[in-house]
Amino acid sequence: MNQSMVLGFAAVSFAIIVVPGPSVLFAVSRAIAGGRRHALLTVLGNATGLFVQVVFVAVGLGVIVTGSDGAYAVLKLAGAAYLVWLGISAIRHRDASVGALDAAVPERSSAPLRDGFVIGVTNPKSIVFLAALLPQYVDAGSGMVAAQMILLGAVFCLIAIVCDGTWAIVAARARRWLSSDPRRLTWMSVAGGLVMITLGLLLAIS
């Protein structure tokens, strides 16, 4: 795997992760309920659970990617369709962000790291997403496909920690402002949906 592929993957990952999604809403709700420490531990736990999924996906997809062009094409189109579906779903259910604030975890919670990990490792949507994204930045001719996917997945998780952690810190500092009008998060969901739809369409025609 060459450096340009890693940088390209990092750029795409950043474009996807920086847009608020379910993990961001969860971290924001933790920040509003329990403050910065709770939110950052939640982000770290979520990323750890996500990396466990990366390993499973990498081990299972390595043989498929190197041995079947048809399977690769199916994964690509499935990933594109899934991104579009996620975008439409985010726009349709944009008011769910308000509910995320109402369901915030109280400050007395003592296990934000554990809770974040459980949510990250049991999220079936992220497994499908990783299965669609990782193979497209792997150099099958270089061998060690699973190791390449794990490396890319680690990059993805690190970017997620930085981006989601930034949202968590901002939310912790703006707890009073967000709580005064939780519907402001609705428009964040709409923007995220439009970005995911665009990425899905670009992926399908690339």
Image (spheres, rainbow, N blue to C red):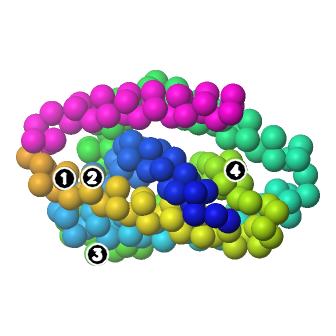
Quadrant containing the C terminus in the rendered view: top right
- Label 4 is placed on what type of residue? Gln
Which of these two is toward me, 190 or 77?
77
Q: CA distance from mark 3 to mark 4?
A: 39 Å
Q: Indicate yes or no whether the magenta region holds residue 58.
A: no
Q: Secondary structure at mark 3?
A: loop
Q: CA distance from mark 4 to mark 1?
A: 33 Å
Residue at position x 55%, y 52% from top?
Answer: 8
Q: Which residues are drawn in magenta?
A: 177-206
Nearer the N terminus, badge 3 or badge 4? 3
Q: In the image, which disc is placed on residue 41?
A: none
Whole-percent x, y for residue 80 in the image: 66, 35
Above or below for 133 versus 86: below
Where on the picture, by quarter, is residue 52? bottom right
Residue placed under numbered mark 2 in the picture: 167
Quadrant containing the N terminus in the rendered view: bottom right
- Label 1 is placed on what type of residue? Val
Residue placed under numbered mark 4 in the picture: 136
- Label 3 is placed on what type of residue? Ser
Whole-percent x, y for residue 79 in the image: 67, 41
Residue placed under numbered mark 1 in the picture: 170
Tag 2 and tag 1, C-beta contact below 8 Å = yes
Above or below for 88 versus 153: above
Q: Can the viewer see residue 156 in this picture?
A: yes
Q: Secondary structure at mark 4?
A: helix
Specify few, some or many for label 1: CA neighbours under 10 Å numbering under 14, 14-19, or 20 or more.
Answer: some
Taking the image as shown, residue 55 lies to the left or right of residue 121, namely right
Which of these two is toward me, 33 or 68?
68
Q: Can the viewer see residue 124 in this picture?
A: no
Taking the image as shown, residue 70 lies to the left or right of residue 16, namely right
Q: CA distance from mark 2 to mark 1?
A: 5 Å
Residue placed under numbered mark 3 in the picture: 110
